[in-house]
Amino acid sequence: MRTAIALIRKRLDRAGIVLSGLCAVHCVLGIVLVGFLGLGGGVLLSPAIHRVGLGVAVGIGAVSLGFGVLRHGRIAPLVIGGCGLLLMAAGILVSHGWPEAVLTICGVTLVAIAHLRNLQGHCAPAR
């Protein structure tokens, strides 16, 4: 049972890393396609996509990073991930374009770093 839980935690951390990367790609493509080419604004800039993405990030982050603290006793990944989620939330509150993209990309970068550190903590001996 313990192995299954560890496997789930690792998969959630990996999912968090992949989703962070996809979010960053979405931001960059959104600016390029909408800003420079005038394409896809209705879909790419939809507030619903951003709210759902933030909700998924908060859910995955809370579970995997929270369990990581319980497993290896390191709070740093949770704090780093929390800061990243705050930046992502701030990105929802500003206007579309560069301010949103910068906040969101900085946020997802911190979230990915937190998940990477959490995965490294899985390899460390439990305290």
Image (cartoon, grey):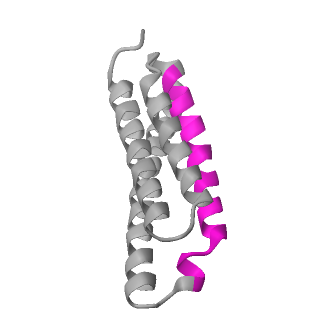
Above-or-below relation of 58 to 53:
above
Front in this rendered view, residue 103 or 76: 103
* Residue 62 pos. (x, y %): 59, 37
- Which of the 4 quarters of the picture holds residue 72? top left
Q: Residue furthest bottom?
A: 38
Q: How many marks?
A: 0
Please provide the residue range marked out in magenta.
Answer: 42-69
- Which of the 4 quarters of the picture holds residue 18? bottom left
| Quadrant containing the N terminus in the rendered view | top right
Q: Is residue 65 within the magenta segment?
A: yes
Front in this rendered view, residue 21 or 5: 21
Q: Is residue 57 left or right of residue 16?
A: right
| Quadrant containing the C terminus in the rendered view | top left
* Residue 71 pos. (x, y %): 49, 20
Q: Is residue 116 left or right of residue 87?
A: left
Q: Residue at x 47, y 21 (%)?
A: 75
Q: Main secondary structure of the magenta part?
A: helix
Front in this rendered view, residue 118 or 86: 86
Q: Residue at x 35, y 15 (%)?
A: 125
* Residue 81 pos. (x, y %): 48, 37
Above-or-below relation of 41 to 49:
below
Above-or-below relation of 95 to 90:
below
* Residue 109 pos. (x, y %): 38, 48
Q: Residue at x 43, y 51 (%)?
A: 108
Q: Is residue 68 within the magenta segment?
A: yes
Above-or-below relation of 125 to 41:
above
Q: Residue at x 45, y 76 (%)?
A: 30
